[in-house]
Image (cartoon, rainbow, N blue to C red):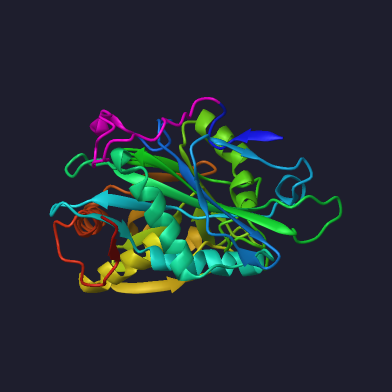
Amino acid sequence: LVLSLVGFQFWRVRPMSKKEQTVGGAGLDWGKLVFGTRVDTHCYIKHVWKDGAWDEGEMVEEPYVKMHVLANVFHYGQAIFEGQKVFHCKDGKVRIFNDKMNHIRMSRGAERMGMPTMSLEMFQSALTRVTLANLDFVPPYGSGASLYLRPFMVGSGPQLGLGASSEYTFMVVVAPVGPYYGSAVPAIVVEDYDRAAPNGVGQVKCAGNYAADIVPASRAKKQGFPVCLYLDAKEHRYVEEFSTSNFVAITKSGVYLTPDSVSVLDSVTNASLEKLAVDMGLKVERRKIDFDTEVDSFQEVGAVGTGVVITVIESITRGSKVYKFEQSEVLQKMYNKLRAIQTGDEADPHGWMRDIA
C-alpha cells in the first residue's frame, strides 16, 4: 500500500537542488502563505525502529510511504505527532523554537501509546537534518512566515491481532506556513460530542484525538464558527480545550487563566506564554474553569498552540447565549513578545531557541 504523506497529489517534492541552498531560495510568495497550504519541498527524513533499536535515518525525496496493508497504524491507531516552527532571525541565523519541550511531550505520548521513545539527540538531529535539507523553504526574516516541522511516529509493523507494533517509523515533514486564521474568530461550545474521556489519551498528541474533532468542526464551520470549544466529557461543565489549541483567558482581574485537566494536551506554546505572563507581571492560574459561572469574568480569550500561536476568540456561543470579548490587548502583547523572541528581535531570556544554521 502506497500512501501520499500530505494531501494526495497536492503536495509535491522538488528534486533536491545540487546548488547550495539559501533561506528563501524557493522564491515563494512568502507574505501570502497560510497555514496548511500545499507547497513543494525537497524531502523528508525517515527513521525505522526494529528489533529494539532505531536506524540512522535517511532522506526521502518522494512524498510517499510504502507500508504493509496490515500495518498497526491502519487498524489499531498507533500514531503520534508533534509540531514546531523554524525561524529565519534578524541576525541571519536559522533557529527552532523550544524543541526540547516537544521531545519531552512526544516521549510521554509514546509511553502512553506503547511506542518506543528516542533520545533527545536523535530527535533534534532529525529536525536539524530535515531543515538543512529544505533550507530553500525557510521563509526569510520579515515575511511573517515560518517553516513548520511535523515529526510523527506510526506503528508500521504488519499484524492482524490487537497489540503493540513490531516496527515503528518516525518521520519529519516540513512546510512553510503563514497565519492559521489571520484574525479574531468566533467559537462555539460543542454539546453533542466529546473530545476525550477522563483517563483516556486526551493529554497525548495522537491522531485519534484530532479525528474526533473532524465531524463537530465541520458542522461548526457550516454554522459560521471556525473553532469548537470542548467541555469536560463527564459533566459538560468545565473548560477543556479548543479543536486544535489550548484555551487561555485573561480575566478582568488580570489573571492568565488556563484549564488543568488530564484530558488536555500539554501545549508547548501555552507553557511558554505562562512564563511570559509572569514576566509581564500577570498572575497565572492553571485550574478547573467552570464555563457557565466564570465566562463573564473573561476579558480576553485566546486559542494557543504551535500552529495558531495565539488566535483571539471574539465570542463564544453556547446554545442561545453569545458571550463577546471586546478586548485583546494583553494577548496581542504576548503574541508580539513571543514572535519577537522567535525571530530574534528581542532577547531569549528563557533559552527557548536553538541554532540550526
Question: Which residues fall within the magenta stretch?
Answer: 9-33
Q: Quadrant of residue 267?
A: bottom left
Q: Quick one: quadrant of the N terminus? A: top right
State the residue at coordinates (47%, 62%): 123
Q: Quick one: quadrant of the C terminus? A: bottom left
Is 172 or 225 nearer to us in this picture? 172
Query: Is residue 117 on the magenta stretch?
Result: no
Q: Quadrant of residue 179?
A: top left
The answer to whether any part of residue 295 appears in the image is no
The image shows residue 258 at horizontal and vertical percentages of: 42, 65
The total of numbered circles placed on residues is: 0
The image shows residue 213 at horizontal and vertical percentages of: 59, 44
Q: Which SS type dominates the magenta stretch?
A: loop
Is 271 or 117 nearer to us in this picture? 117
The image shows residue 331 at horizontal and vertical percentages of: 27, 56
Q: Judge left or right: residue 352 versus residue 39.
A: left
Query: Is residue 13 on the magenta stretch?
Result: yes
Q: Judge left or right: residue 20 versus residue 226.
A: left
Q: Judge left or right: residue 166 versus residue 66.
A: right
Q: Residue furthest right?
A: 161
State the residue at coordinates (53%, 63%): 106
The image shows residue 110 at horizontal and vertical percentages of: 61, 65
The answer to whether any part of residue 144 appears in the image is yes
Is 72 or 307 nearer to us in this picture? 72
